[in-house]
Image (cartoon, rainbow, N blue to C red):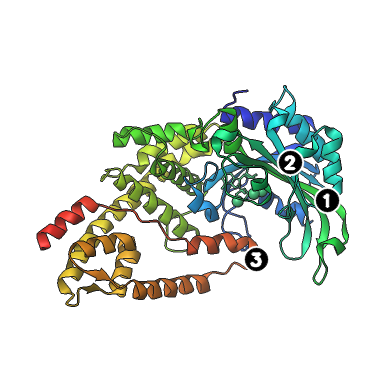
């Protein structure tokens, strides 16, 4: 089957609606009154009040397509075929209503029926938690071959104490042309682009308590189902795309960038990163995030700077991001029509931030020139390199390369000391309390790979100083 992004979404919502699920609108990317979470990062995060019993839903069955941001996946963007910082998670939920049997029956039906997704059964693999024999037996009973059922220790969903349980995940085999992997790689969570994880079904069945092993946890009186399936990954399978980026959800953004840069798209990582980040920035600003130096605003700022740097790497020195926003909004407006009301504002914010950053880069080059002129020891101080990095957005590698041309070195050790001091400051400024906040920590620990910003210009500069 060949399905477009919006067709996948419609099939999902309608299938579960026909099974008496209430369609829930996507919640905002900005969690409402939840200090434990920086961004909405899963479908179930939007349903928290139902899952912890604060609110009893009118209908215990719900279906949604939730906007998500996962900053902990930033390093994966462009490196794997399947990770984004912003993505849409399709989910079905049961609050104390149906449980394992129906959840698995629904999954089987929507995945394999010619009326719905129509996946060839031989391409699907299913993981289960080793002691969760009920799930194993249910998949067998419904017609899955034993060699497509894979036991994995990773299939347990648990955050501290409280509701938890095993999960069962569905993988699609894209075939040996995506690498010489065996099904062992699924089990061991080995990085591979052959077996794509499509869907996670969480069976919230136990109540985790301290000092008990998983096998000893008591059963919950009301068992819940929560699931999450990545829309972009379904699209890549249905469109036989090499990565999620070669689908109708991303290609128009990438093509626009190819237009702007005059460079043909051949799978370059930079193009993927730019397309990914501009989607995230646009959707976050639409939900009311602002650009700033802390928390959510800092995430947006860094994504934007990273996109600008990758633009520069492709020879673009003028502001270009707001042109991409137009394309993002065209793609997303059928699902999120509120984008239309805010598009002018979103473009303005992005444009002025981009100009500001380009100016910063410019003055960073001046600053570097000063530093070189002032140092007597043929060594650029770690503190100076840090100022270039932190204030002017210069990656360390750029400063090093430039220094090297002039026969200088950078005091990398001292630079790293400054880096860790800053991380410490950031850490103590944060207020998040639960492990759900770990994504934020991962993000703060992430450092950009080396990108040669305006290198042309700098080497010219180097010659002049010489
Ligand atoms: P992976 O192992 O590939 O990183 P995950 O196990 O972290 O995925 P879950 O937390 O189980 O993902 O989320 C449910 C589903 O959401 C996944 O099965 C996948 O389809 C989708 N998904 C998760 N993270 C991303 C992402 N960064 N970009 C796009 N889709 C994602
Ligand atoms: Mg992940
Ligand atoms: Mg996984
Ligand atoms: Mg998973």
- Which residue is identified by label 1? 132
Nearest-to-viewer mark from 2 and 3: 2
Q: Does 177 appear above or below 360?
A: above
Q: Earlier in the sequence, mark 2 or mark 3?
A: 2
Q: Which residue is mark 2?
A: 126
Instruction: Give the residue at x 27% y 58%.
Output: 360
Q: Is residue 396 left or right of residue 299?
A: left
The disc label shown at residue 434, or none: 3
> Left of 380 or right of it: where is 91?
right
Classify 10 Å Cα crowding around label 1: few (below 14), some (14-19), many (20 and above). Answer: some
Q: Mark 1, mark 3: which one is toward the viewer?
A: 1
- Spatial CA distance of label 2 from label 3 is 30 Å
Lateral position of residue 349 relative to residue 95, left or right: left
Q: What residue is rendered at 46% in x and 36% in y?
A: 329
Quarter assignment of residue 410: bottom left
How far separated are the C-alphas under marks 1 and 3? 27 Å
């Amino acid at each position: 089957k060949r399905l477009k992004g919006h067709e996948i979404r419609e099939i999902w919502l309608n299938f579960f609606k026909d099974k008496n699920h209430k369609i829930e609108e996507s919640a905002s990317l900005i969690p409402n009154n939840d200090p434990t979470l920086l961004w909405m990062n899963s479908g179930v995060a939007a349903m928290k009040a139902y899952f912890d019993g604060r609110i009893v839903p009118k209908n215990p069955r719900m279906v949604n397509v939730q906007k998500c941001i996962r900053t902990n996946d930033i390093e994966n963007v462009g490196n794997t075929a399947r990770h984004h910082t912003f993505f849409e998670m399709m989910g079905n939920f049961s609050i104390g209503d149906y449980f394992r049997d129906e959840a698995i029956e629904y999954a089987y039906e929507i995945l394999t029926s010619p009326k719905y997704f129509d996946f060839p059964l031989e391409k699907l693999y299913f993981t289960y938690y080793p002691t969760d024999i009920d799930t194993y037996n249910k998949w067998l009973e419904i017609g899955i071959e034993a060699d497509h059922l894979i036991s994995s220790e990773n299939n347990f969903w648990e955050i501290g104490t409280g509701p938890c349980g095993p999960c069962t995940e569905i993988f699609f085999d894209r075939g040996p042309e995506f690498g010489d992997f065996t099904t062992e790689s699924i089990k061991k969570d080995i990085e591979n682009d052959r077996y794509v994880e499509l869907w996670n079904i969480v069976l919230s069945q136990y109540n985790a308590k301290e000092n008990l092993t998983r096998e000893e946890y008591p059963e919950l009186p009301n068992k819940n189902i929560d699931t999450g399936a990545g829309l972009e990954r379904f699209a890549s399978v249905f469109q036989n795309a090499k990565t999620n980026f070669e689908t109708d959800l991303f290609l128009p953004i990438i093509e626009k960038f190819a237009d702007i840069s005059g460079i043909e798209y051949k799978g370059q990582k930079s193009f993927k990163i730019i397309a990914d980040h501009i989607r995230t920035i646009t959707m976050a600003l639409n939900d009311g995030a602002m650009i700033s130096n802390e928390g959510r605003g800092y995430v947006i700022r860094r994504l934007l700077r990273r996109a600008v740097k990758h633009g520069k790497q492709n020879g673009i020195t003028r502001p270009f991001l707001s042109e991409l926003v137009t394309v993002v909004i065209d793609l997303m407006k059928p699902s999120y029509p509120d984008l239309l009301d805010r598009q002018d504002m979103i473009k303005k914010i992005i444009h002025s931030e981009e100009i500001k950053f380009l100016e910063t880069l410019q003055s960073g080059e001046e600053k570097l020139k000063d530093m070189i002129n002032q140092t007597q020891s043929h060594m650029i101080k770690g503190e100076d390199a840090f100022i270039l990095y932190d204030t002017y957005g210069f990656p360390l590698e750029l400063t090093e390369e430039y220094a090297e041309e002039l026969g200088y070195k950078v005091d990398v050790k001292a630079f790293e000391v400054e880096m860790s001091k800053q991380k410490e400051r950031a850490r103590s400024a944060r207020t998040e309390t639960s492990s759900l906040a770990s994504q934020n920590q991962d993000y703060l620990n992430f450092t950009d790979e080396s990108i040669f910003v305006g290198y042309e210009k700098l080497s010219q500069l180097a010659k002049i100083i010489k």
